[in-house]
Image: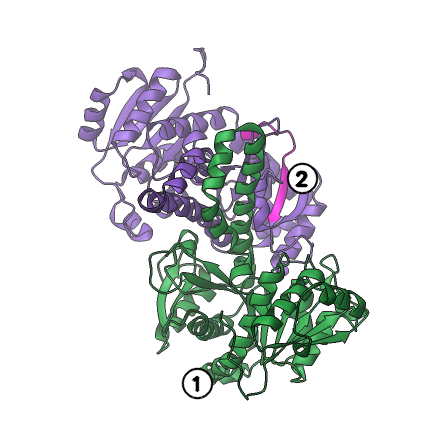
Chain colours: A purple, B green
Amino acid sequence: MKANPPDSSPPTVIAVDAMGGDYAPGEVVRGAALVSLTTTIHTLLVGDPDQIKHHLQENEHNPAQIVIIPTDQWITNEDHPREAIMHKPRASMLIAAELCGQKQAHGLVSAGNTGAYVLSVARHIPRLPGIHKTAIAAVYPTQNVQRRHDPFALLLDVGANVHCSVDDLVKFALMGKIYASDVKGVANPTIALLNMGKESHKGGDILTRTYAELERLEGLNFVGNIEGNEIMKGLADVVITEGYVGNIVMKTIEGIAETLQHLGRYAFKHRFIWMLGLIALSGGIRQLKQVTDYSEYGGAPLLGFQEIVIKAHGRSKAKAISNAIKVAAKTHRDGVCAKIAAEVAKFMTDNPEKNSLT
Amino acid sequence: MKANPPDSSPPTVIAVDAMGGDYAPGEVVRGAALVSLTTTIHTLLVGDPDQIKHHLQENEHNPAQIVIIPTDQWITNEDHPREAIMHKPRASMLIAAELCGQKQAHGLVSAGNTGAYVLSVARHIPRLPGIHKTAIAAVYPTQNVQRRHDPFALLLDVGANVHCSVDDLVKFALMGKIYASDVKGVANPTIALLNMGKESHKGGDILTRTYAELERLEGLNFVGNIEGNEIMKGLADVVITEGYVGNIVMKTIEGIAETLQHLGRYAFKHRFIWMLGLIALSGGIRQLKQVTDYSEYGGAPLLGFQEIVIKAHGRSKAKAISNAIKVAAKTHRDGVCAKIAAEVAKFMTDNPEKNSLT
């Protein structure tokens, strides 16, 4: 991503939970420092001021673009999301979400506890009109290495919810379409429904009705059902599923990457030829790992809120954090939340019978 | 698997759909021929008599152990299951299922159309008392290469059903327990529920109640929820899930094996070092492929019927077919269906309130 040329428009401000993530606050602060040197983005770093100052002192940065928002509480990965939100009212991710909800920031980034993050955001940032369930969209690379446009695809929801209604899944499709257009630069991204077979009647009542609804919708490039083995093939730009299934699928893929790495360690001790194989194949394994390892493309958006919210992977280092901040800023500048709101509003106008659900 | 020593007990008879599978009837007939040379198992080969005779002539076999059951209809993978069953009443898999239902065979094997197979079996073989939904159990290798007992695990259901009730899932656990004990030789196999988090309250109403029920059951080695990334790790001997999710997970894993093979072909053209890597890593990739490629361990059982029913993979060659026939025979001799029936009956007696569901 290129740095923005300096201009007269007010800077984009991103609130960052400096205390969230396996390598926080050090790598988060380093990520913000990188952003301050290469872009015009301003970041609000929410967290322990002493630690943040310490890491800023150690890393070159532009102090004019970084503001420290001090707090003495933060949520760890071990915390139970609902209890943490209740007992840590000054937690860094809650304050960061509040800054964004109060329009003091244009976007939000955290690499912390996913469940607590979803709750923090839900508390402080309103959902878009017509959206009942927000969705975490995993951005993942497909095997479409030969396609001209970039080979990334979206899978949503991967765990903001458990089960979904037909209306929820249709709105995931609308939100995914707009985000994919923006992220991928594809005018009319292909949308598919994750299912246990190709036929429109597969997968039970909700999926059957969702299929019919998506097929009926004008302006939606719906390509039908896809099965598990097609997720990585890039047959669709946006893959829709309920959070329970999306979460299990994403973690299954993550587990396979781990299994291959485990084989690598095993191989290192036992089979030299396997070790050589793993080194040679590292490009392919990295492709798998990237499914849940967002360092290259800036994290998973939480779609359906009035502001742009990015969940960076827990294992994010400085580069991943800086990409997440840049993606948040770009998504804000492109007006993606407003575009999603317009798409959903159009759907509600065209389908007045759906309004009763709001 | 070793050949049975000749003895005076009547032979085990397995009905085989000779026309089902990508390489049928040639490889199916070859599989039966292999079995006739190395075991005392008798097979009933159901299909086109001319083609079966032709392949038998070309392969060494013991004619005393093979009977041809002629028919002029069979179901292809392209056939719509329900329509095929309706319009092809003499289809080879229907006749094979009928032979088994009439006790002319002790077990059943097909590598054909999965949906049509489930329907054929349901038409001719009764379910066990107390079983409302049968389940396809995928047998897959885990990364537990260092454990003393074999590293295989069961995932069920992978597509006989879409959604399941608490009672269905509990009975999958009971059936999986018995089958795993038999296949793996582990006295008290560990059972886990596939979910989107470790905590007992995760995954919505049905999974939460299933968790409580499994935890409460005496004699069941329930180890709690496992997540997608733990499936391949072998943290449990038996993993329980509804068919919709199991099917997507199994196909996702299959898809990753395909992706790695695709990378191999791409690599062959573009990156010699990747090709070397794939050759060196073939053991690891084979481990992934085996999840859905049952050649080594004889196919996926359909659990819940009064007779043993094995679904061999569509791509089965002779060795896989012969293993499927041998597994069916061994499972019959071990009385696994009767043991499952006893386990379910015990559950019904201990939990009389569940009988209202039958």
Q: Is disc 2 in contact with disc 1, using a CB cutoff of under 8 Å?
A: no
Q: Secondary structure at mark 1?
A: helix
Nearest to viewer (mark 2 / mark 1) = 1
Give residue B103's position: percent from left, percent from top: 65, 85
Identified by mark 2, the residue type is Leu
Q: Secondary structure at mark 2?
A: loop
Q: What residue is pinned by disc 2?
A: A220
Q: Which mark is residue B150?
A: none
> For the point 52% across and 74% down, which residue is it?
B3
Q: Position of residue B136 (x, y in %)?
A: 56, 67
Work out whether residue B297 or residue A92 is closer to the camera in this orientation and state it: B297
Q: From the image, which quarter does the C terminus of chain B lie in? A: bottom right
Residue B340 vs B21, above or below: the answer is: below
Q: Which residues are magenta?
A: A182-193
Tag 1, which chain? B
Q: Residues within 10 Å of mark 2 (few under 14, many from 20)?
A: some
- Is residue A102 left or right of A132 when viewed as pictured? left
Q: Residue at x 36, y 21 (%)?
A: A35
Q: Position of residue B178 (x, y in %)?
A: 45, 75
Horizontally, is A38 left or right of A24 in the view? right
Spot occupied by residue A125 in the image (x, y as percentages of width and height) = 42, 39
Q: Are marks 2 and 1 on the same chain?
A: no
Query: Is residue A158 visible in this depiction of the protein?
Result: no
Closer-to-camera residue (A229/A339): A229
Q: Which residue is mark 1?
A: B346
